[in-house]
Every structure is written in structure tokens, then in C-alpha cells.
Image: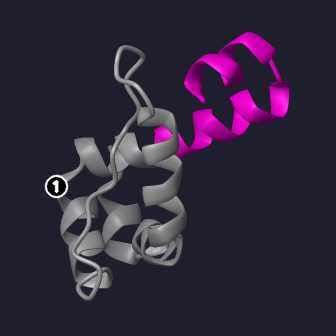
Amino acid sequence: MAVAVREAGLKLSSRLLGRVRHVADVFRRSATATAVLALKQKPLEHKLIMDIATRRDSTRDMLDGYLGQQAAATTALISPATRHNAP
């Protein structure tokens, strides 16, 4: 899927992937955001992952993981603790 998205050059796909990468990156860089996300996703016990160009199907895995945790990620991002300590 990653190759198909890159080769197609679709602006919408690129924009969507960029936004999901940004969300995953926020949680990767911020300990506070990660702690808030862990509290919000307690029943899920999953991690958000970023795609890697050299890893097959990592884009699909990133999108699947994000879609499964979208509500928890959104709630964590708008949490006052996360907004106050934004990187």
C-alpha cells in the first residue's frame, strides 16, 4: 500500500498520512501526551506506530492502529494536560 500511495501522488492521501504521522509523532515525543493516551486507552493497551519506508505494510499498520484508537488519541490531544505541555 505504501508504494501505491507514494506513486499515485494523491494530495488527499498524502495529507491524511501526514496528519496521522504527526499525531503518532506527538505521542512519540511527549511523555505527558503518552501518559494521557495510556489512561484514555486503558482497555485497548495498544501503541500508535509510525510508518517506515523500508518496512512493508507499515503504512497500513499505522492507519489501522490509528483508526482503532482515534477516539482515545483525540481525547488525549485535547486534554488540558497535553495542551499545556505541548512540545
- Pinpoint residue 28: horizontal percent, then vertical percent: 26, 44
Q: Quadrant of the C terminus?
A: top left
Q: Nearer the viewer, residue 70 or 78?
A: 70
What's drawn in magenta, residue-wise? Answer: 1-22
Report the side of 61 relative to 45 (left or right). Answer: right
Describe the colour scheme in one phrase.
one colour
Q: Nearer the viewer, residue 67 or 57?
A: 57
Q: Quadrant of the N terminus?
A: top right
Residue 5 lies in the magenta stretch: yes
Residue positioned 23% across, 82% down in the render:
39
Determine the residue positioned at 43% across, 58% down: 65
Dot 1 corresponds to which residue?
31
Kindly identify the residue that appears in the image at 43 percent across and 76 percent down. Answer: 72
Q: Please identify the quarter of the rendering in which residue 50 is found.
A: top left
Q: Name which quarter of the figure residue 32 lies in.
A: bottom left
Residue 19 percent across, percent down from the top left: 60, 42
User: Where does residue 53 sit, x and y in percent of width and height?
Assistant: 42, 16
Residue at point 23% right, 85% down? 42
Q: Relative to 72, is 33 above or below?
A: above
Residue 34 drawn above or below residue 81 = above
The reply, left or right, for residue 59 in relation to residue 25 is right
68 in the magenta segment: no
Residue 80 location, x and y as percent? Answer: 39, 75
46 left or right, relative to 59: left
The amino acid type, in three-letter code, at marker 1 is Ala
Q: Main secondary structure of the magenta part?
A: helix
Is 53 situated above or below 27?
Answer: above
